[in-house]
Image (cartoon, rainbow, N blue to C red):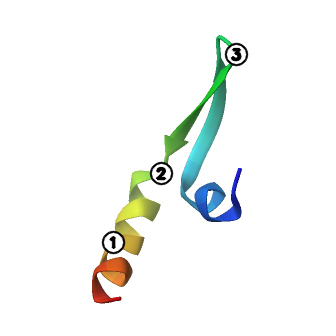
Amino acid sequence: LDPRMAKLAGGVHRLDGQLMVVLDVDRVLELAPEMMAA
């Protein structure tokens, strides 16, 4: 994974030849205020 995405990922699972990235919602919400201020 891209290092930026890896920081937000809670896990990665393989599904029928594809990857599903499970986001860590707490980490995503921590970044939201920073992104809005930029």
Of tags 2 and 3, the one toward the viewer is 3
Is 5 left or right of 32, judged from the image as shown?
Answer: right
Which residue, given by chain and number where applicable, does mark 2 sit on? Answer: 24
Identify the element where label 2 is drawn. Answer: loop
Mark sitting on residue 32:
1
Residue at figure coordinates x 57%, y 50% from the top left: 9
Which residue, given by chain and number where applicable, does mark 3 sit on? Answer: 17
Residue at figure coordinates x 64%, y 36% from the top left: 12
- Disc 3 crowd rating (10 Å Cα; few below 14, some 14-19, many 20+) is few
Q: Position of residue 15 (x, y in %)?
A: 62, 16
- Dot 2 or dot 1: first in sequence order is 2
Give how far apart the Cα atoms at labels 3 and 1 are: 31 Å
- Dot 2 or dot 3: first in sequence order is 3
- Disc 2 crowd rating (10 Å Cα; few below 14, some 14-19, many 20+) is some
Identify the element where label 1 is drawn. Answer: helix
Q: Position of residue 36 (x, y in %)?
A: 28, 80
Q: Check whether the beta carbons of the residues at disc 2 and disc 1 lie within 8 A of each other.
A: no
Q: Check whether the beta carbons of the residues at disc 2 and disc 3 lie within 8 A of each other.
A: no
Identity, as a three-letter code, of the amino acid under mark 1: Ala
Image: 29 above or below 37: above
Of tags 2 and 1, the one toward the viewer is 1
Image: 5 above or below 30: above
Q: Nearer the viewer, residue 16 or 12?
A: 16
